Amino acid sequence: MKRWAGQVSAAASVAMLCMSAGPVWADDPTTSGDRAELEVLKARIEKLEHKIADQDTKETLSAPPPQTAGIALPSGLQGVQMSGFADASFTYNLNNPQNRTNALRVFDTRANSFMLNNAELVIEKPVSSESRTGFRTDLDFGTDSEVVGTVTSGLGSGSDELDIQQAYAEYLAPIGNGVDIKAGKFVTLHGAEVIESKDNWNISRSYLFGYAIPFTHTGIRVNYPWSDTFSTVVGVNNGWDIVDDNNQAKTVEMGFSATPIEHVSLGTTFMTGAEQTNNNGKQRQLLDIVAGYQPIEPLQLKLNYDYGWEDDAVSYGNNAVWQGLAAYARYALTDRWAVAVRNEFFNDFDGVRTGINAGINTVFATGVKLYEWTFTNEYKLNDHLIGRVEYRHDQANEKVFRNRDLGQRSYQDTIGFEVIAPF
């Protein structure tokens, strides 16, 4: 634009010089050439003025719009993320039980019925070396909350279909490789499965997930990664599946996770503490081991072992003991289609964990041995819609499963259908 202005100025100067040369007579032949040159200069000046005007118009149109005032998020909310999913299912029980209940199941408890299992909303701010303070809140709506939200041990009888599954503050302390500290309510470290169905390989949950381990804890947890392949965790909390403590004692958790060699993972956790109401001395302990192996890209294998015991949980002087083993395999046939299988054994020696000795099934006042195998076919229609079909067979050493005629059987077969919409 400065270049055009210079040309116009030069042209204007020439014109002024020409006009200041004195009067010009019409009949003077020596001035006719000057008049012609003056007309040429005027034409050039007009042409330059048009070019400058066009250039100004283009610059005005291409200029960014003026900035307007907006709503700025507080610094503590920078980096906040939101996610979740909706999960619905239908389970058909071939025993057709009169009480419409799939006996000894965890979440898929209603036979021959549609269920809104979970509509979960997660709001979180992950921690990092650039932003060391964070938080997470998981809100669960649906029938899964009736189980997760209960304050009793094992499979409870809650009826509230709303639960705050997790709600904790988090801080990544700048010590060594970074000490991760969580305070609040969080999910357990134990087990090969999780509460969110979308992150499991099967529709139904294992006996180990429902009866051998807790779901959540309220307290403080500290994790430290010693290297890229080894980390440890330690925590103190109020106990198993409770927010308000039921005694004055506290429960301690500790464990480690490692990837000793490529494609192999190993995690071990241990928990001990007093869990009985108004009793600070009688301890409940749990050892949980989860191993994973991926020999080839589409094939994943997992193994989960649990061993637990509790002082005087059966009666005075009689401890409760339980243990189980579950094996998993998942094979991705394509990017969208996968099949999974689970085979499991769970021994509730005294019937305390399953409730056989506490009113859920009062036919036997002793323990029960449970077996199950499950086949699941999963197809992902897109990134936001997953469909599953599952066949499961349950077997027991006693007749603990209901029948259509109010009788009981030692086995139970179910067919499940599930739709999950993650976002």
Image (tube, helix red, strand yellow):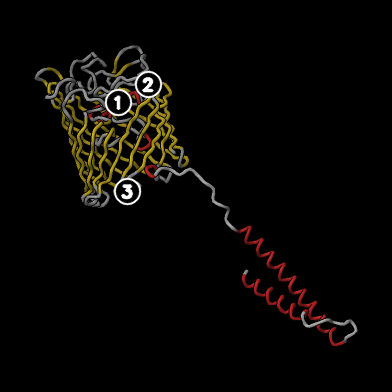
- Name the residue at 27% across, 46% down: 172
Residue 117: percent from left, percent from top: 39, 27
Residue nearest the viewer, comparing 396 with 208 = 208
Q: Which mark is residue 246?
A: none
Q: Residue farthest to the left?
A: 317
User: Mark 3 = which residue?
Assistant: 128
Q: Which residue is mark 2?
A: 110
**Which quarter of the image is occupied by the N terminus?**
bottom right
Element assignment for label 1: strand
**Real-space CA distance between mark 2 and mark 3, rounded to the nearest whole angstrom:** 42 Å
Residue 87 placement: quadrant: top left
The mark nearer the N terminus, 3 or 1, is 3
Question: Farthest residue toward the right?
Answer: 27
The amino acid at mark 1 is Asp
Q: CA distance from mark 2 to mark 1?
A: 15 Å
* Marks 3/1: CA–CA distance: 45 Å
Q: Amino acid at mark 2?
A: Arg
Residue 26: percent from left, percent from top: 89, 81
Which residue, given by chain and number where applicable, does mark 1 sit on? 394
Eye-nearest disc, 2 or 3: 3
Q: Residues within 10 Å of mark 2 (few under 14, many from 20)?
A: some
Q: Nearer the viewer, residue 346 or 412?
A: 346
